[in-house]
Image: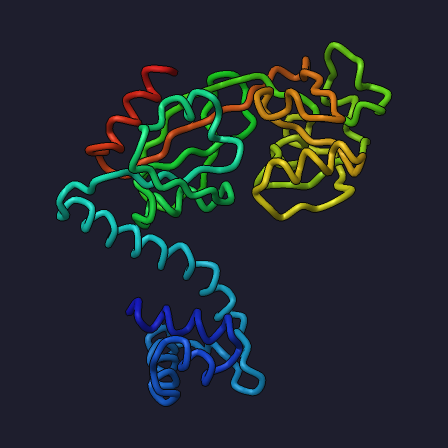
């Protein structure tokens, strides 16, 4: 499939309008219509209804493939440019909010760093497409087990840090004075659903046999301070790495004693890092 036609189709489907897609892509409306007709002819199936503009069943299936396909094309372009270009000065680092722990902070060079805090699933994509030289991602795992990351492109990952996890509770919570907690004992508690800041609830469910951990409040953000303030105010519990959970006013950070899980951070890169990226990768691997 011609990627230009595929990109046009995705834009029309997203905006539900040929004219709006033409405006966004910088084409004429007739050119957009021709792109869609050519793609439908190539695939031998109608992809869109016209009034209203909406994907057909075949179009919906194509949309499932289109995002990863276009991302892989961007990743391939970025990989070639990365190899062909002269080594860049400075470093662009993409990280999820709680992946930038004490070890990573200590390893950062004193100048020349551009830091981007992103949603967890967006970090590998940023590295794959070349908008970041390196990425740091984190999650819940058994000790020494690798994280499961989105398959966006051929990327290299390796662990750079592991630390204990703690349940963050308001100081008034009945369990706040415990020396340790079993995660399963809190499966029916009120939890904060903050997939890009706290350790995601699906990972907690997986560690508990696939059930429990219903959300009391959803937080779609990347500011750890907002999350901890919500926990301190009693809006729900959160699971965080010990370094992020300790010392938050109005809260208690109680270690998880069962199951045996850790907060794991991994470095992500494409190709062979050079310059400042290589120096940071070496520093992190040495500290690990």
The C terminus lies in quadrant: top left
- Left or right: where 211 falls relative to 150: right
Nearer the observer, 129 or 260: 129
Residue plotted at (32% across, 50% down): 129
Specify the farthest residue to the top.
179
- Left or right: where 219 falls relative to 28: right
Question: Against 6, is 174 above or below?
Answer: above
Question: Against 177, is 5 above or below?
Answer: below
Is residue 242 at least partly visible in the picture? yes
Q: Position of residue 271 (x, y in %)?
A: 23, 37
Coloration of the structure image: rainbow
Residue plotted at (38% across, 74% down): 8
The N terminus lies in quadrant: bottom left
Q: Position of residue 41 (x, y in %)?
A: 35, 80
Specify the farthest residue to the bottom.
30
Residue plotted at (45% across, 46% down): 122
Is residue 212 at least partly visible in the picture? no
Q: Position of residue 137 (x, y in %)?
A: 46, 34
Question: Against 141, is 80 above or below?
Answer: below
Corner quadrant of residue 195: top right
- Left or right: where 100 falls relative to 184: left
Question: Against 44, is 234 above or below?
Answer: above
Q: Position of residue 149 (x, y in %)?
A: 45, 37
Nearer the observer, 258 or 1: 258
Residue plotted at (65% across, 17% down): 259
């Amino acid at each position: 499939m011609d990627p230009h036609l595929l990109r046009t189709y995705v834009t029309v489907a997203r905006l539900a309008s040929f004219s709006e897609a033409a405006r966004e892509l910088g084409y004429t409306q007739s050119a957009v219509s021709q792109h869609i007709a050519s793609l439908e002819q190539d695939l031998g199936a109608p992809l869109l209804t016209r009034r209203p503009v909406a994907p057909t069943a075949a179009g919906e299936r194509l949309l499932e493939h289109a995002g990863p396909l276009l991302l892989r094309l961007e990743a391939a372009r970025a990989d070639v440019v990365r190899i062909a270009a002269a080594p860049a000065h400075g470093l662009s680092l993409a990280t999820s909010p709680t992946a930038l722990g004490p070890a990573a902070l200590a390893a950062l060079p004193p100048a020349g760093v551009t830091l981007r805090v992103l949603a967890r699933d967006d970090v590998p994509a940023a590295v794959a497409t070349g908008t970041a030289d390196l990425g740091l991602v984190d999650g819940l795992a058994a000790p020494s087990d690798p994280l499961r990351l989105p398959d966006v492109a051929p990327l290299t990952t390796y662990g750079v840090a592991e630390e204990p996890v703690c349940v963050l509770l308001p100081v008034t919570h009945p369990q706040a004075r415990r020396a340790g907690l079993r995660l399963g004992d809190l499966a029916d508690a009120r939890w904060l659903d903050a997939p890009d800041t706290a350790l995601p609830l699906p990972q907690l469910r997986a560690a508990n046999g696939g059930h429990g951990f219903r959300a009391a409040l959803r937080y779609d953000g990347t500011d750890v301070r907002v999350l901890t303030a919500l926990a301190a105010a009693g809006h729900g519990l959160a699971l965080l790495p010990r370094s992020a959970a300790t010392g938050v006013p109005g809260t208690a950070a109680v270690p998880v004693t069962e199951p045996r899980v850790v907060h794991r951070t991994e470095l992500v890169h494409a190709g062979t890092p050079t310059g400042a990226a290589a120096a940071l990768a070496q520093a992190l691997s040495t500290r690990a």
